[in-house]
Amino acid sequence: MGTRLRMLISAVIVASWVLSASGAHYHTHRHYRLEDVALTEEIDVRAQRNKRATEDINALLPADTPDDSTPLPPGGDPSDLPTCLLCVCLTGSVYCEEVDPDMTSVPALPKETNYLYARYNKIKKITAKDFGDIVTLKRIDFTGNIISEIEDGAFAKLTMLEELSLAENLLVKLPMLPAKLVSFNANHNKLRTKGIKSNAFKKLSKLTHLYLAHNELEAVPLIPETVRTLHLQNNNISSVTVDTFCKSNNTYYIRHNMNEIRMDGNPVILGQYPNSFICLQSLPIGRYQ
Ligand SMILES: *[C@@H]1O[C@H](CO)[C@@H](O)[C@H](O)[C@H]1NC(C)=O
Ligand SMILES: *[C@@H]1O[C@H](CO)[C@@H](O)[C@H](O)[C@H]1NC(C)=O
């Protein structure tokens, strides 16, 4: 009898905590950055209060059986907080932008996440375990972190991934990319030609946008036929060949999809390679001499 009453009271406390916590969380959707810390403290205080209330009730009631059925709400160390308290989770999307305290690794994601925005944090490394079984991901944005290392299998299993941004990081090489990628952005890194496998993009049969500007590339990688927009400006590319964009053994070949190539800010003098661009419908932007 005592146990049942105690369970009922515990249930009421937990239910009211969940309701008020979700109200507070809803509130943070509008002001989440400033209020993350306040929310953390608020939940911490509430957890303490509820813990005290539960202890008081336990003291009043006869201790007929040990009661371990009271789940205590989360609180304490902010690093233990679930992703959706540090970040904002809205149906299928997780927004972790400029998270405070610093986010240095990929957060654990709720199952069925489609979109992850983790821009402007301090993430250093992406491991093969980070996305584990979150194969539902369609878009990932890591712009503006300090990523210098990505384990080769990290993205390989994400068969639904269409957009990936690794812009403004510290990468010198690229991992294996998933086959359905439509847009890939690695602008503003430290990519070297030897850090990009020769078939890195070749097998991406849906790729239309490829951004590799502001890196240290010395050559143009193999570009799939599907690509429409290619940004290679501000690299260290000093030459191109007939086979870079066109086909040396087929003078009738036209690269129909390509409509924007940027190669300005490279040492290459495009005017020296007139035969390298005859298959294109518009010339690259760059210096002609
Ligand atoms: C650019 O490439 C040349 C060789 O073609 C090399 O000597 C130079 O150090 C490179 N510059 C940068 C910034 O990597
Ligand atoms: C050009 O060479 C490639 C292999 O390098 C070959 O697959 C293709 O059939 C050749 N095209 C012509 C028109 O000879």
Image (cartoon, rainbow, N blue to C red):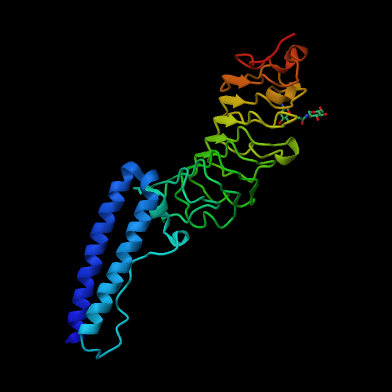
Relative vertical location of residue 248 with respect to residue 67 in this rendering, above or below: above
Quadrant where the C terminus is found in the figure: top right
Image quarter for residue 284? top right
Q: How many marks?
A: 0
Q: Residue at x 51, y 47 (%)?
A: 159
Q: Quadrant of ligand 2?
A: top right
Residue 83, how many percent across, how many down? Answer: 43, 55
Relative vertical location of residue 166 with respect to residue 3 in this rendering, above or below: above
Look at the image and tell me whether residue 249 can be seen: no
Q: Residue at x 66, y 21 (%)?
A: 263
Residue 17, how many percent across, how many down? Answer: 25, 63
Q: Nearer the viewer, residue 181 or 238?
A: 238
Q: Is residue 102 left or right of residue 247?
A: left
Q: Is residue 121 left or right of residue 176?
A: left
Q: Residue at x 69, y 37 (%)?
A: 191
Residue 176, how many percent across, how many down? Answer: 63, 46
Q: Residue at x 56, y 23 (%)?
A: 257
Quadrant where the N terminus is found in the figure: bottom left
The residue furthest top is 289
Relative vertical location of residue 242 with respect to residue 207 in this rendering, above or below: above
Residue 178, how many percent across, how many down? Answer: 57, 44
Look at the image and tell me whether residue 119 can be seen: yes
